Amino acid sequence: MPSLRFLLPLRAVAACAGLLLASGLHAQEIVVSAAASLTNAFQEMGQAFSRSRPQARVTFNFAASGALLAQIRQGAPVDVFASADQATMDRAAAENLLAPGSRADFAANDLVLVVPAAATAFPARIADLTQPAYRRIAVGTAASVPAGRYAADAVEAAGLAPALAPKWIYGESVRQVLNYVARGEVEAGFVYRTDALQDAGKVRVAATVPTRTPVRYPIAVLAASRQPAVAADFAAFVRSPAGQDILARHGFSRP
C-alpha cells in the first residue's frame, strides 16, 4: 500500500488539475443578449453549440432589443448581441459597440395579429380593430420593443393611428404581449409569427400584418467582448446550416 506521504501530493495534483479544468471551462463562457422572440430557438441553439464545443458555455439574457442595448451601453458584460430589428443594431454600430465586421443578418420573421384561442371575434385585417369588439389591443412599447415599432408603423401606414391609440395596452417585450393575449386579458395583439407558434393552443393568428420594413434579425460580436473568439464562433454557428435548421424548426425563415 502506498504511503500517505505519496498519496497527499497525488491528491493535491488532482485538486490543482480540477481547478485548472474549471478555470479553462470558465474562460470559454460567453453571454449572449438576444431579443425576447428568440428565447426558445436560442435556448436550443446554445445546447447545440455546447455539444459541438464542449468547453464552451453560453449564458443567455432575453429581453426587448432596446432594453438589451441600454444594458450594453451601461457596461453589461455581453459578448454577443442579437436584435429583432436593424434600427437597434444600427444604434449599437453608431456608438461603436460592435466588433468591426462581425454584424450579419441571420433570420427573418413576420408580424402577425393574434387573438385568444377562445375568441368569438376574428379580425381579418388590422382595420377591423376599429370595431367595438376590440376594446383592448396589446402592442410592444415602440421605444424599446421592435415588434411594437413594426406594429405602430403598420397602423400609421393604414391611417388607423388616431382610432386605435385609445385601445393600446403596452407590453415591455413581445412575449409579454403574447401572454396578455394568451390569458385573454386583451382582445387582440401584435406579435411575431414565431411567438404565436409557441402558444398555438392559446392564441390564433388572425392575419399577417404587412410591414414597410422587412423583419430581419442581425447578430454581432460586441467590441468589449471578453471572449471574442468564442463569441465569433457562436455567431457563426447561428448562421451555419445546423443553426439555420434550429431557427427553421421554431418558425424563422432565412434573411
Image (cartoon, helix red, strand yellow):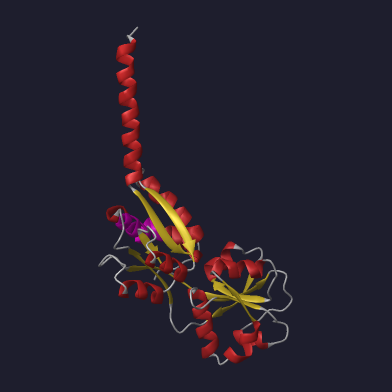
Please identify the quarter of the rendering in which residue 224 is found. bottom left
**Relative to 188, does residue 60 appear above or below in the rendering?**
above
**Predominant SS of the magenta segment:** helix
233 falls in the magenta region: yes
Nearest the viewer among 80 and 217 is 80
The residue at 36%/38% (across/down) is: 22
Residue 145 position within the rendered picture, expressed as x and y whole percent measured from the top left: 50, 73
Give the residue furthest to the front: 74
Residue 52 position within the rendered picture, expressed as x and y whole percent measured from the top left: 36, 47
Nearest the viewer among 244 and 80 is 80
Residue 241 position within the rendered picture, expressed as x and y whole percent measured from the top left: 36, 58
**Relative to 80, does residue 123 appear above or below in the rendering?**
below
193 falls in the magenta region: no
For the N terminus, the image quarter is: top left
Q: Which residues are magenta?
A: 231-244
Nearest the viewer among 31 and 160 is 31
For the C terminus, the image quarter is: bottom left
Could you tell me if residue 40 is visible in this image? Answer: yes
Please identify the quarter of the rendering in which residue 122 is found. bottom right
The residue at 55%/90% (across/down) is: 158
